Amino acid sequence: MDNYELRPITEDEVYAFQRCFEKAFGHDHHSDEAELERELYELGRTLAVVHERDGVVGTALSLRRELGVPGGVVPAAHVTAVSVSGTHRRRGLLRRMMTRQLTELAGGDEPVAALWASEPPIYGRYGYGPASYLLSFDADNRELALPVPDSAGYLREVDLPDARELLAGIFDAARAGRPGMSGRRGADWRAVTADFEHRRRGRSGLRAVVHEGADGPDGYALYRIGRGGDASGPQGTVHVEEVVAAGLDGYRRLWGYLLDVDLTRRVQYDFAALDEPLLHLVSDPRRLSTRLGDGLWLRILDLPAALAARSYPADVDVVLDVTDDVLPGNAGRWHLRVAGDELTCERTDAPADVALSIGELGAAYLGGTPLASLALAGRVRELTAGTLVPLSAAFGWHRAPVSIEVF
């Protein structure tokens, strides 16, 4: 291990850093995309394993972005680009990177970290829990009907990237109140709307359509068209990348449009929420061919700050016994008391009512994974009879958490 150094990268090492995680994920290097990605991060938030002979052989990165939580937003570390070179695996490099990254992040003002888990078993070991879930649709649009609203709204196509500012305004209005949605800066929008040829994979360029409601633009959809056909006729596919709407009318018109694009027979979308309205709007939900998958994984960095940063729909008075093998500052017994607008979370020597790990607490944090469900799986233990049900209700939320982008 003396041959390895663990540290942030310098500007001269950006290319080597990018090539390390590109290779790990099976991606080719594209300089235009790499330049855009470089805009997204600060060198001080990178972490690399540098070998004395081979250079950068391990990478990790955190991006500071807002994250929607029940009742508000928090600054959150968005962890990405975690990789170890295939020629340097099985040497404890990932463990060293993850431990150091979490330790350093815990000393800052971001109470939680979030990531997309390429391999879920890895991140559970470091205290991350699956905090949101996604539905994927692979719909046969010939079998679906969606009533068009009677409102005076209408749709119009817009050109990218000229419409970034317009889309950003719609996005900010629509994400208010939705846990799991991440805020976007200018560089984030440039990344979302970039239309590099290698990203198309034989599909059309990225297209955008905006809904104009009574008070102005209030929804948009980003999509691509995959052309195809056989002897029976056209068999194209609408590949939906984002559907964002602040109101139901815009939402219905946008989905009505996507399900009725000329010369297409299928509609695919991978980022639907568990409470997606489309499930209740289409004539036959089975035709959506829905599949469930995990979405955002969340890690609590500062337990009292994180619990104080979200809202609770029910009062609760409970002592939690929390285990955390990586950040001992979170471990121990905590007295959580919520009474109306008053909230306290303090260390205590009182007997515990519920025992759980920091991973289970992270899974429940956005309101989408009930603590009661985790208890049924033996992941949460009720130590004082009658305390788990009100605690689970207090951690719930009226909207399912969802993240609509892989960062």
Image (cartoon, rainbow, N blue to C red):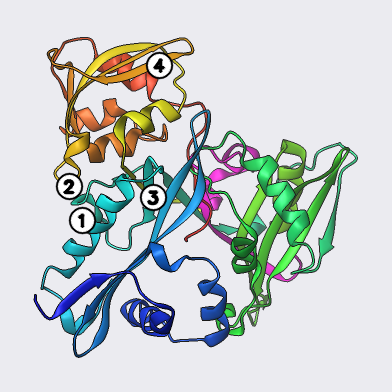
- Answer yes or no: is residue 360 visible: yes
> Which residue is nearer to you in this view: 332 or 104?
104
Picture coordinates of residue 318, whole percent (x, y):
26, 14
Picture coordinates of residue 48, whole percent (x, y):
29, 72
Q: Secondary structure at mark 3?
A: strand
Q: Which residue is mark 3?
A: 114
* Residue sitting at x 18%, y 85%: 87
Q: Secondary structure at mark 4?
A: strand
- Amino acid of disc 2: Val
- Amino acid of disc 1: Thr
Picture coordinates of residue 14, whole percent (x, y):
42, 80
* Residue sitting at x 38%, y 83%: 19
Determine if the magenta segment contains residue 117.
no
Q: Which residue occupies the extreme bottom position in the image?
A: 53
What is the quadrant of residue 162 in the picture? bottom right
**Tag 1 and tag 2, C-beta contact below 8 Å:** yes
Distance (Cα) linking label 1 and label 3: 15 Å
